[in-house]
Amino acid sequence: MSSTPADERTRNRGASPSTNASSQTYILFVVTCLFVSMTGNFLHHRLADPHNVHKHAMRQFEMNHLGGHAKLDEQMKKQKIATKLQSTVTDSGEKPPPPVHDLAGLSCSDHGGPSDDLAKEMIYWSDIPSDDKFVSPIGANSDKRKYLTFEPDGGGFNNIRMSMETMIVMAHAMSRTLVMPPSQGMYLLRKDRGKQRVHFSFDDFYHLEQVGYEHAGLHVISMEEFLLTEAMTGNLFNTTTGDVAFPPNNQTNWDGIDPKPLKEYLRDVTLTPLNWNPGSCLVAFPSDDGPEHFAELDEMMKEVNANFPKVQEFIDKPVPVNAPAIERLREAVAGRIKNLCVYDEKMQDASVIHFMCYHKMRVRFLTHFYAFLFFESWEQDLWSKRFVRDHLRYSDEIQCAAARVVAAIRERARRNDPTGNPNGDFDSFHIRRGDFQYKNTRLEADQIYENTKDKLQEKATVFVATDHQGKPFFKPLADHFDLVFLKDFKEELKDVNTNYFGMIDQLVASRGRVFFGCYHSTFSGFIFRMRGYHSQKEKVEGWEHGVLPNSYYYSGKKEKAMYESYGPLRTPYYSREFPTSWRDIDQGIEELSALGVQI
C-alpha cells in the first residue's frame, strides 16, 4: 500500500527528535574537546613554561622572605605568637612565677632523698636578696630591648659550662636579654640513645628560668621565644643585604634539631664580634655608662702597659679584692694580656650580639668568666663571682643524687673504720684517661699511688671519679684503699639519666677530705672551685688567701701542691681554676646597694 503525503509528514515528524539529539551530543562533544584543549594549552603556558615557573618561584620567594607573608599566613603567624606568649603574661601584664626551686637551700624530698639534714652538706651557695636587685649601669637606661645570643662550646661539658658562665655574666653586664640555645646533643652526653633523653638545654642542668625571674638585671628567654618575637615579626635583617631575614624554613622550635642552619642564620643577622679573643684581650666594663668612661678604662690599660706586671709579683701576694681598679687590673692582666676588648658604641647600639663558636676560625670562648671580664667597680666584680656561685649551680635533681651517694659513701667509711672514723670521712680522686690530649697526665695506677700515698691513709675509703672503664687498671690503688666508684651506687642513682653522672661525680668528689685531681682537666678544675666555695663558707685554714688545704694534683711534684699557695691568673688559665674566683667574694654586699641601678 502506497503512502500518502500526510503519512510521510507524520513519519518525518517522528524521526526529527532522534536526529536533533544526535546533533546536540556531537556539538557538545566538540565544544568539550575544544575547552579541554584550550585549558591544557593555557595551563601549559602558565605553569609548565619555564619562564612562568621562574616568575612564580620568584613571586613566592618575595612573599615568603622579602615582602612578608600572605595575609592568611600573617594571621596564622600572629596567632601562633600570641598563643605562645600568652602563657608568659598574666592579666596584670606581669610574668607569672615559674615552678619554685629554692636556690638558697636544698630540699630533696621531691627528688628521692636524702633527708635535708644529709643534703645540706652539698650547699656551698648563699641567699643574698640584695644581690638579686643589682642592675648593671651599662645600658640599663636603654628604651629598646637588646639581646645576646651564643653558641655552646663544642668541647666537653665543662668547656660548655665555662663558656655559658661567661655569656650569662656578659649579658647581665651589658643589660641584654640572654637568649638560651635550644636543646641539642652535647659532646660525651649521648649515652644510651633511644633509652633516655640525649638532647639537653642548660635548663636541664641549672635552674636558669628561676635565676632569670629572681634577678632584676637579668632577663632570660628561650631561642624559640626570641625567634617568634623578633625573627618572625620581621625585626632581623641580613647584615650584608639589609633584607628582612626569616629563620630557615620559618622554623622557630629548634629543640633536638641539627643546629647548624640556625647558627649560620644567626651569624647572618647579628653583630658577631670575631676579634673578641679571650687569649688576647680583656673585656672591661666601667662603673658608669657613656663612651667617656670606656675611654678612661682604655687610658688605664695604657698606664698598666707602661710598666707591664709579671705574674711573679702576685704569687702569695694577692691584691685586696676592694683595691683601686688600676691595682686589680695589673693583677688581672699580669704576664698575659695587653689589650682590651672594647664594647664600643657600634656594639652597644646593635640589637643583637651573637657570640659564635667555630673552631676552624679559632673563635671560641674557652675561658673562665673571671679571667675574661674585668669590672672597674670592685663591688660589681665580687657580685659577678657571687652570682655564679649562688645561682649557676647544678639543679636540685643532680645535687640530690650526689647527696645520696655521699651519704652512702660516708656510711661505708664508718663501717670500714667504726672507731676511728665516726664522721664517715672519705678521700677522692678524679682520674682522667679517655680521650685526654695531655699525655703527661696519663699515669699508670701504681705511679698515681706513689705520687699520692703521703697524703692518704692506708685502707681508707676512697671515691674515684673517672672516665676509665674497667676496674683492673685500679688494682694498685685497690690494694691499699677501699675504692668505690659511681657505678657501685646503682640503687642511689636509680632512674637518674646517666648523662648526669659526670656532674654527680664532680659533686661527690668535691666532698672528699683529701682530693687529688687531674692536671689540665677542666672537670677537675670545677671540683677545685667548688672546694674553694666550701672553704670560704666553712672558713677552713687559709680561706682569707684563697688557699685550699688537702687539694692536690696527682700527676707530679711541680703542680701537686699548687693550691696550697695563692696563684694569680696564668696561662693556660682555662685548664684550671684560680683563687680569685672564690677568695673573699662576700665582701661589698652592703656597698653594692649604692652602686648601679636598683629596681
Image (spheres, helix red, strand yellow):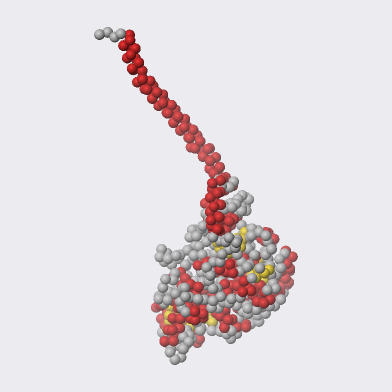
Q: Residue at x 58, y 54 (%)?
A: 231
Q: Give the tally of numbered discs.
A: 0
Q: Residue at x 57, y 72 (%)?
A: 391
Q: Is residue 439 above or below residue 143?
A: below
One can see residue 310 in this view = no
One can see residue 289 in this view = yes
Q: Is residue 294 left or right of residue 570?
A: right
User: From this viewpoint, which residue is outermost toward the left?
Assistant: 1
Q: Residue at x 67, y 74 (%)?
A: 592
User: From this viewpoint, which residue is outermost toward the bottom?
Assistant: 419
**Whole-percent x, y for residue 281 in the image:** 65, 67
Q: Residue at x 60, y 61 (%)?
A: 93
**Whole-percent x, y for residue 122 in the image:** 51, 78
**Could you tell me which quadrant the N terminus lies in?**
top left
Q: Is residue 28 above or below residue 324?
A: above
**Whole-percent x, y for residue 498 in the image:** 44, 70
Viewer-closest of 101 and 527 = 101
**Whole-percent x, y for residue 315 in the image:** 64, 80
Q: Quadrant of residue 558?
A: bottom right
